[in-house]
Image (tube, rainbow, N blue to C red):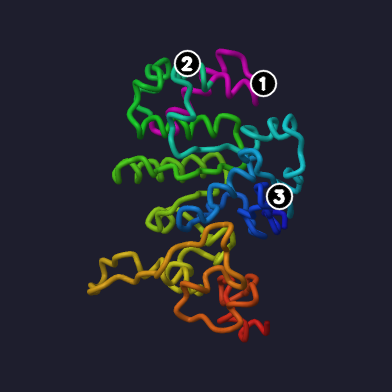
Amino acid sequence: MADTLLSVKDLVVEFPQRRGLLRALDQISFDIKRGEILGVVGESGAGKSLTGASIIGLLEPPGRVSGGTIELDGQRIDNLSTAEMRKIRGRKIGMVFQDPLTSLNPIFTIAEQLIETIQTHLKLSDKEARKQAIKLLDDVGIPAASQRIDDYPHQFSGGMRQRVVIALALAGEPELIIADEPTTALDVSVQAQIIDVLKNTCKEHGAAVMLVTHDMGVIAETCDRVAVMYAGRLAEIGPVREVIKHPKHPYTIGLMGSIPSLAHQVERLVQIPGSMPRLDAIPEGCAFNPRCNRVFDRCRTERPDLIAVEENLAACWLHAKEAGA
């Protein structure tokens, strides 16, 4: 489709081990449209950050993409060389990491880091690049940007550093931003500010966003669609309101039930028994079957693909009759 910016099809990521291959992502498929914000949510270890790292070509060795395809704006990028991927990284895909201190070099000023990034991707003079850097800092809400631009990272608070990281991610005017837990290390009031900055600046710059988080509140506030991951697989994907209000997969239902509601009081929140399986011990059939309260025989032997259920897609055999599967 013409408005599809990123297309991930049957993505498989494996890590060679002494006892064989460890499959960390197992046939992940989703699209992101231009200007859309897709949230990716799930427990720690579900594969959220690994999906983002695979797209931008920053998999930690010996991890490798061993199956499927990743296409950006119609061009396949999962099979590009390191040098070719470096041209795309920053220019077409920007990255916002969880900890801004790992993204910013402490011995260089913000101006030096922003100007270098801008000039790497855009043909601008020093004066033009500095002007663009100040504008980016203004866009992300850094007060007195023209004065603060010559400060060092340690002179900024955590929230302000994360704003600078967003400015860095936007410096090459990319079409896609991958934001990996951008608010995790920040307090709640600053989280809200950073989410607003990410939404507004990406809207102004026309960038699509893949927002990786474990916070359903952030997803509800920010995203157009949400993908729920479990044990390296997609459990459910759909419009954010549908997934939150009318979840179709038992795992998503459990996640939603564990969130306190202001509308009505309950004595106990829903609890999902057990824990997510290790990647070397994923059960046969549906990976969620040992923890599911609606499990039946087929769940233990056959792995479900994503099945269309109203506006959502859910990998659950409960909906097989509706889809004729």
Question: Does residue 279 appear left or right of residue 259 in this picture?
Answer: right
- Please tell me whether residue 230 is drawn above or below residue 115 in the rendered image: below
The reply to whether the C-beta atoms of the residues labelled 2 and 1 are less than 8 Å apart is: no
The tag on residue 108 is 2
Residue at 48% across / 18% down in the picture?
Answer: 111
Q: Residues within 10 Å of mark 2 (few under 14, many from 20)?
A: few
Q: Position of residue 134 (x, y in %)?
A: 46, 22
Q: Is residue 230 above or below residue 292?
A: above
- Name the residue that disc number 3 marks: 70
Say which amino acid is labelled 3: Ile
Q: Earlier in the sequence, mark 3 or mark 2?
A: 3
**Residue 184 image point, x, y percent:** 39, 44
Identity of the amino acid at label 1? Answer: Lys
* Image location (x, y in percent) of residue 81: 76, 35
- According to the image, label 1 marks what residue? 123
| Contact flag, marks 3 and 2 (Cβ < 8 Å) | no
Which residue appears at 42% of the width and 33% of the height? 163
Q: Is the residue marked by circle 1 packed among few (<14), some (14-19), or many (20+) residues within 10 Å?
A: few
Q: Quadrant of residue 268?
A: bottom left
Q: Is residue 113 visible?
A: yes
Residue type at mark 2: give it.
Phe
Per the image, label 3 sits on a secondary structure element best described as strand
Residue drawn at (22%, 74%), measured in percent from left and top? 267
- Specify the segment rendered in magenta: 115-141
